[in-house]
Image (cartoon, rainbow, N blue to C red):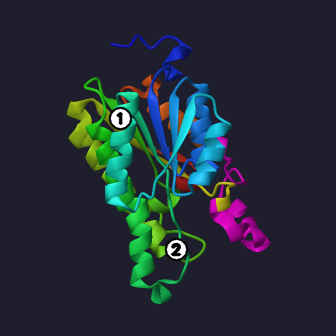
Amino acid sequence: MPDGRGLDRFRVDGRVALVTGGANGIGLACARLLSDAGARVLVLDKDLSAARDAASSIANASSLGLDVSDPEAIAKCFAEIAGQEGRIDILINNAGLAIRRPSLELDVADWNQVLGVNLTGAFLCAREAARHMPKAGGSIVNMASIMGLSGGGLYPNISYQTSKGGLVNMTRALAVEWAALGIRVNAVAPTWTRTGFIGALEANPELMERIRQVTPMGRLAEPAEVAHAALFLASPAASMITGHILAVDGGFLAQ
């Protein structure tokens, strides 16, 4: 049993860590922090060129192209990594997609695309990672959202909110199912974060001001602030934590 002493419990030295959607934003921040904490990092992204650029700026990192909406590609990619690295210890399930349209105008194809990435893709990545984790166990951190715990969005985003709500309960269900395997499954639920993912929203000063107004701390999160929460959940410091949804939200959900 860990004795709880020492900051080394927050390190992940020698572990093999995969980050989906790792070429930019929160994913890139997670990849960098995992490397700083001692992990061997695999940056996975649909944009292979961006993944390569990201990995080139991170110590002990490599890159692979991966479309998480493609089940066969996921299985092939994770098997290849496990074959080369010997195992998978950590998965940061970060790849995400948002199509912001009012519910009455949202095509079924767009709905399916968002759920295919945010929910089904996350499940398939978690399942493949679990198949290659050592008997001593591993850690999966899903990137949820405050919108998976609240319906109070500031703009129509029904497919995203639904997918993240499903991801929250998937996290809990997998945590219970895989606890006997020594695999911990948790999630981080960020607030609006200063990345390219929120895109055109930053071009709307009124909306940005509204976000600050509904956030007790009065600002957006920074990618590194979310990454620190993900590292904690992935690390031995969280060895007794599974099935937990850690909000990084400046107090939004406390209201």
Label 1 is placed on what type of residue? Ala
Q: Which residue is mark 2?
A: 157
- In the image, residue 49 lies at what x, y percent? 61, 53
Q: Nearer the viewer, residue 83 or 131?
A: 83
Q: How many marks?
A: 2
* Residue in the picture at 27% in, 29% down: 182
- In the image, residue 210 lies at what x, y percent? 71, 68
- Magenta span: 197-225
Residue 171, visible in the rendered structure: no
Q: Is residue 152 magenta?
A: no
* Picture disc at residue 227: none
Residue 145, visible in the rendered structure: yes
Q: Which residue is mark 1?
A: 82
> What kind of element bears circle 1?
helix
Q: Quadrant of the C terminus?
A: bottom right
Front position among marks 2 and 1:
1
Quadrant of the rendered image containing residue 178: top left
Relative to 103, is 215 above or below?
Answer: above
Q: In this rendering, would 206 be left or right of 67?
A: right
- In the image, residue 159 lies at what x, y percent? 44, 72
> What kind of element bears circle 2?
loop
* Residue in the picture at 55% in, 32% down: 34
Q: In this rendering, would 18 be left or right of 52?
A: left
Q: Nearer the viewer, residue 219 or 121?
A: 121
Q: Nearer the viewer, residue 128 or 235?
A: 128
Quadrant of the rendered image containing residue 135: top left
Category of crowding for the residue at label 2, using alpha-carbon neighbours closer than 10 angstroms: few (below 14), some (14–19), many (at least 20): some
Relative to 166, is 227 above or below?
Answer: above
Label 2 is placed on what type of residue? Asn
* Residue in the picture at 72% in, 60% down: 212
